[in-house]
Image (spheres, helix red, strand yellow):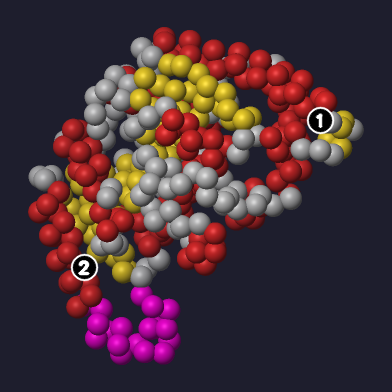
Amino acid sequence: MARKSSFLFPTDFSAYAEYAMHYAFSAARRYGAEMHLVHVLDPDLLSHGPSLGLWVTDTDREKVLNSLREHVQSRLDHLIQVAEEAGVRAVSHIAVGNPSVEICRSAQTLNCNIVLIGTHGRSGFDRYVYGSTCEKVVRMSSVPVLSIKNPIQKFVKEDLSSICVKRVLFPTDFSSFSQKALPLAASFCQEFGATLVLAHVWERAAYFPNFMPEMELRNSPKIMNEARESLEKIASEAGVSDLEIQVLRGIPHREIVQLATDTDVDLVVMATHGRSGMALTIFGSVAEKVVRSAPCPVLTVRPTARLDAPQPTEPSARKKKAELALAAKLTHTGHGA
């Protein structure tokens, strides 16, 4: 990673963002990077309709936005002060629009090298109804994204004094997409003297165990050996001296998360195919599922994507939550992350 860098740190001022801020500021200090702090005002928060007995009209819309901008700016100013006290150069930005789209757009227009973002790690029904800004940024961002939630394993001290990375996990499916993340994984290992764990998960076809068990028994050793040989070839090209190879069977995201948990991995580095729409609904995304469940930060890389591509329509249930969030913002007077 280049020493002269520009990082983007989106914040919604939640406890999740505050936790991620430790990583963002510590990384910015280490790489001498300028930190861009951005908060996105979501227009869904100003949607028409009754909200706790209030009605936001077009006339009132700009007044409410201006009030929110003043409040948000005061909180960003506080974060800039915190950053300066931590020895980090920081500037603030306020955007209006869809949070995930505006975060990705900001990363491009500000020429940022990386997005560092906190994730709430939602799962189940709540994630399907409300979605996850972090996961959408992972899917769309044309620059690497470091996703951070309050984890079991962490590599930054709370006082921001140091970064300690001992084990980096690089999962690959041997596609051209997955290989794009290898140089980043190798560079982290070289810089921190960390162990690079190369892993491949063989996802067996669903019909093998029930209908063709003899084929599974016959092909399993061959497939596993071929996967190990492929990982050994990747290892020879990675340029990292301390290496481990893991070949696993099962559901990819579950095996990756379990491996990270069992072997005290500090950082997962992986590529995402950036699927969207029906493809995402049918096939899902291994990277996004790992981001959601991993016990440590996850750094994702994907091919450049168009930011003006049509975005999935948010479910109507989100609007109700947005109205409640607006009321909370208007009544909240505290400062800080």
Q: Main secondary structure of the magenta part?
A: helix
Q: Residues within 10 Å of mark 2 (few under 14, many from 20)?
A: many
Quadrant in the rendering for residue 324: top right
Question: Which amino acid is tagged 2?
Answer: Ala
The answer to which of marks 2 and 1 sits earlier in the sequence is 1
Q: Nearer the viewer, residue 189 or 312?
A: 312
Determine which of the numbered discs, if any, sits on residue 227 in the image.
2
Residue at image point 75% right, 23% down: 62
Residue at image point 55% right, 17% down: 76
Residue at image point 24% right, 86% down: 218
Residue 29 in percent (x, y) is at 32, 19
Residue 20 is a magenta residue: no
Mark closer to the observer (2, 1): 1
Q: Nearer the viewer, residue 105 or 212?
A: 105
Vertical order, 10 against 76 (above or below): below
Vertical order, 217 against 229 (above or below): below
Question: Which amino acid is tagged 1?
Answer: Asp
Q: Nearer the viewer, residue 272 or 219?
A: 272
Residue 303 in percent (x, y) is at 36, 49
Vertical order, 325 against 275 (above or below): above
Q: Nearer the viewer, residue 172 or 209?
A: 172
State which quarter of the image contains the N terminus: top left
Determine which of the numbered discs, if any, sits on residue 335 in the image.
none
Residue 232 in percent (x, y) is at 13, 60
Part of the protein shown in magenta: 204-221
Determine which of the numbered discs, if any, sits on residue 58 in the image.
1
On screen, residue 306 versus residue 269, left or right, reads: right
Quadrant in the rendering for residue 156: top left
